[in-house]
Image (tube, rainbow, N blue to C red):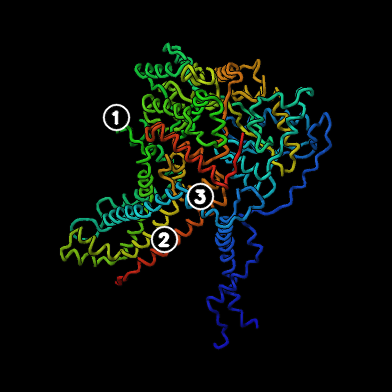
Amino acid sequence: MFNTYRRGLFILSFLAAPVTLYLVYVISPYMQAFYIAMTDWRGVTATPNFIGFDNFIRLFSDGIFWKAVTHNAALLVLLPLLTIVIALFFAFLLNVGREGQGVAGVAGSRFYRVVFFFPQVLAVTVVAVLFQQVFRPDDSGMLNAPLMAIGMDPVGFLSDPDIAFWSVLGVMVWQAVGFYVVLFSAGLASIPRDMFEAAQIDGAGRFSLFFRVTLPLLWDTVQVAWVYLGILALDVFAIVWVMTDQHGGPDFSTTVMATEIYRNAFQYFRFGYASALGVVMFFFTIGFAILSLRLSRRERIEY
Amino acid sequence: MANTPHITRRGLLRAAALVPVAGALAACATPQTQAPASSAAPAATSAANPLGVDAKKPLEVWIFDGGFGNAYATDIHQPLFKTKYPDAEIKHNVTKEITKVLQPRFAGGNPPDVIDNSGANAMDMGALAQDGQLQDLAPLLDAPSWDDPNVKVKDTLDPAVVEFGTYDGKFHVLGYVNYIHGIWYSQKTFRDNGWTVPKTWDEFIALCETIKKAGKMAPFTYAGKHPQYLYEPLLTMAAKIGGNEVLVNIDNLEDGAWSAEPVRQAAEAWAEVGAKYLMQGTAGLDHVQTQTAQNKNEVAMLPCGSWLENEQKTTTPEGFEYGMFPIPDFTASDKMPYGTLHTQPGESFIVPSRGANPQGGMEYLRAMLSKKAAGDFSELVSTVSVVKGAGEGRDLSPGAKSATEALAAAGANTVYYRWRSWYGQLHDEAVAATGQLMTGGVTPEKYVERLQKKADELKADSSIKKYKR
């Protein structure tokens, strides 16, 4: 009897702890969020009332939340696109960009590699506070001071509702690029050198080297980057909450789903409604993950 | 090999899922139904102990560590409480994050005894009151005051305190500080330049024009990142034009309260200031940055409350002499006279009803409301308290003096609004819209239309608790 289950018990003893933690800290809060979403809980009551799908019905006419969704959608398209294009460009220059014979990066690439990674080392909050200063609309602002010195009006990077969203996007790209340069560099390192050399001998310039050799061989890594960045775009919170005026303003021009959830829960004390928003965001994220995995299936290049 | 037990991945996961006992799932975010704390039984009340305080029970106090710091609690209030209850241990706590620290305590059924529920991260009073989490402070109001057994606590307070702290007919929240709102300036700068305090809106605009022409500094600014600093004078002006009922209607979510003519006129007046007289970059600066700019004489005037002087004490140059003036007369036919002020009790203290020692909590508030405690407090943090006459004979700073005089001059002509704490969503919409109004993003007409729309939305939403005043 014991023998029959010995191996099972052995494996079980290893899995019990992580699975327990996962259940208690991940699965159980999810299920509770689904339950709370159907109550009118305000965060302090002991006995929330069950109200069914009222919160979800209310959510459909919540203009600000849907505005937040469009911002997330815009980020979902723009953030991966910009980050990957810039990171690929830099990774290529740092690793195979040198003109002439041999495969090597541009001059000083070791130095640049370190510099590009700096933003990744900073905590998001630090980045957010830093950029508040960079974007300051008076002569203490790093960007506005030179503009004002040449007699132009300061730009309201964070105070003009038409510009603020682009400032947020810019900061997110700035912070993400460094990591993806490293990721793509690692991907490039695993491509055999002779492929580049062979292409060079055949007369490929930097341009066709990039589009004909580097990009196809890196496609797997690019897909991974796309999924990561997509998820980053969907659950962005800290940058917006800390950096922008009025936490997602001015005039809700930078707000995203996560900030609306936080605002409803911790400022309006509508925990039930906020959970309903969270459930909607959960389905958006899951939907994105499934979609991107489906769409990105493609022949793998073996070498 | 045939005897090797075969384990499928599914079988394994199924087994693993059963291992954590269900009890582990109890560590969760949903509220637990709990029997109310067994604290309620108060000690017998007497003339010396009107609230029935158990002299040995410990008292847990949480102070919001904001502009006023927390020295007033440890150096003034707690020693005073101790003189009467030397055996009661006071657990003094300080935080900037009231909600994060204390909301779980309420949900868990063991809140502390006294909370200074203030600051940007304060808990929603409406939600707490709605759930019966707050002690009814009526016994405190009716108790004899700390100083004089013949005077009730209620009679020592500014009447707005009771109105303001009442939720659903019950007095729950004690505002300790009397915030007085107005336009703040440097008395010295005005004197040096020969500028005088404007009494009418035309004079105000003329003064802005003079300052602008002089070219030394910008005429006006406000905390552009936090436009609530600007909707405050806007609404006070609307009340001045159309009378107190303008604000009462807004608070009560009456139909057309925001689109009323006085609100539109006030919005139009301030939009003109926004278009012509603001300091450059105002929209992107916060209250500290704009207030510091004023200290550096880069801008002449800004709207603020009486906490300003204490908040700026480290950057204010010697001899700056803060002064405050009320909203000028818009026309000669304003419903309310010159000097009308927006005053509002702030720094809100609450006593949780399900704490271990609510009687002790109320007694602590009674000690705070003694003339000595309130007077020492006013002097320490240069502000005006809600205890009548507590500032008398005290050595007040120029700003606090100016605000106190303005309050005396206003007499009964004070106004206030409560929708900001009642309807958080409306506040956020007003903040967004006011920012747009001042930068020219919306016209005054669209501004009132937009806020009216939001107010109507809230009115129609059954999940949001409605209040009346």
- Please state, as top left, top right, bottom left or bottom right, where the N terminus of chain A lies in the image: bottom right
Quarter-of-image position of residue B25: bottom right
Say if residue B420 shows up in the picture: no
Q: Nearer the viewer, residue B312 or B119?
A: B119
Q: Which residue is mark 3?
A: A261
Q: What chain does mark 3 sit on?
A: A
Residue with the most extreme left position? A203
Instruction: Please name the amino acid that badge 2 sits on.
Output: Phe
Quarter-of-image position of residue B379: top right
The x and y percentages for residue B392 are 65, 16
Q: What chain does mark 2 sit on?
A: A
Q: Which residue is mark 2?
A: A288
The secondary structure type at the circle numbered 2 is helix
Report if the CB atoms under discs 3 and 2 are less than 8 Å apart.
no
Residue sitting at x 38%, y 48%? A172
Q: Nearer the viewer, mark 1 or mark 2?
A: 2
Q: From what the image shows, is residue B54 above or below residue A218?
A: above
